[in-house]
Amino acid sequence: MSDASVAARALALLDLTDLAEDASEAGLGSLCARAVAAPGPVAAICIWPRFIRQARALLGDGPVRIATVVNFPQGGTAIAPVLRETEQALAEGADEIDLVLPWRAFLAGFLDSPRAMVGLAKSRCGDKRLKVILETGEYPDLTQVRAAAELAIAAGADFIKTSTGKTAHSASIPAARTMLQVIGATRRPVGLKPSGGIRSLSDAASYLALADAIMGPDWATPETFRFGASGLHQVLVDVIAGGAAGQANGPY
């Protein structure tokens, strides 16, 4: 497959993201314009909850979904406020919720709260997509990544996501492989979202190849696979246009 073909495939799976601390309404307008511009569209945008209403006004009922984050980025908010965040985001027009698992509690062996948060958030989401961020770069080993993936899926996650992009260590191939193995053993459809630190065509191609190898070459669609990234968009657009496969700047 040519670089341009890989880039086009990755572009259609992209959650174009702006979760910068200084994110603005002007920046959101630019993000939405990029999300639907040629050679797009991307699968979704991922934004702070305060921008959902504006994003819905800009994107309407077009093909680009609106994702937002709750319990983000630290994952330490109590369940009741997280559920209120989720309900408000959905009421304002979010299509997808990216929820940070209370991963510190999980790693400390307190499983009831993480399990309850995911299950209750999914009950609010209904047929809207719930992506659960495991924050795998902070885990001591892949055994814990596997256990967290199993917990999130059992509690109702529609997707499991590697990272917030706000820690020193984000997505990795070993963590994604482990998560895909758990997904492959699950008896219902569950998706994967590698996020954080995916900046080049080579990075994207590596994750797609992994998904193809474990789940089959036709598995990765916007319904089952997403990339969470910001600068990757321009890299992919440049490659599709015939440019060199460079690398994006920035943390996410």
Image (cartoon, rainbow, N blue to C red):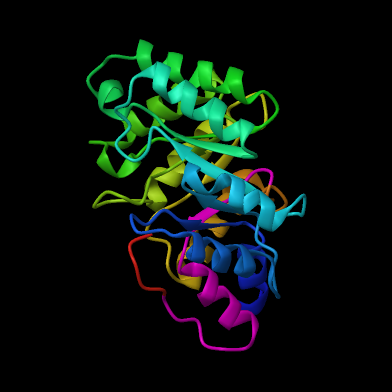
Q: Tell me the quarter of the image containing the C terminus.
A: bottom left
Q: How many marks?
A: 0
Q: Nearer the viewer, residue 60 or 225?
A: 60
Residue 203 belongs to magenta span: no
Q: Nearer the viewer, residue 151 or 66?
A: 66
Residue 224 belongs to magenta span: yes
Q: Nearer the viewer, residue 117 or 155?
A: 117
x 62%, y 88%: residue: 242
- Return the x and y of residue 151 as percentages of the image width and height: 45, 21
Q: Nearer the viewer, residue 47 or 130?
A: 47
- Return the x and y of residue 217 as percentages of the image width and height: 69, 54
Give the vertical position of 96 relative to 36 (above or below): above
Magenta segment range?
Answer: 223-247
Give residue 4's quadrant in the image: bottom right
Give the vertical position of 223 relative to 57 (above or below): above
- Return the x and y of residue 168 as percentages of the image width and height: 23, 52
Give the vertical position of 206 relative to 243 (above or below): above
x 37%, y 38%: residue: 72
Q: Is residue 64 visible?
A: no
- Return the x and y of residue 176 as percentages of the image width and height: 45, 45
Give residue 92's quadrant in the image: top right
Q: Is residue 183 visible?
A: yes
x 56%, y 25%: residue: 87
x 35%, y 39%: residue: 135
Q: Tell me the quarter of the image containing the N terminus.
A: bottom right
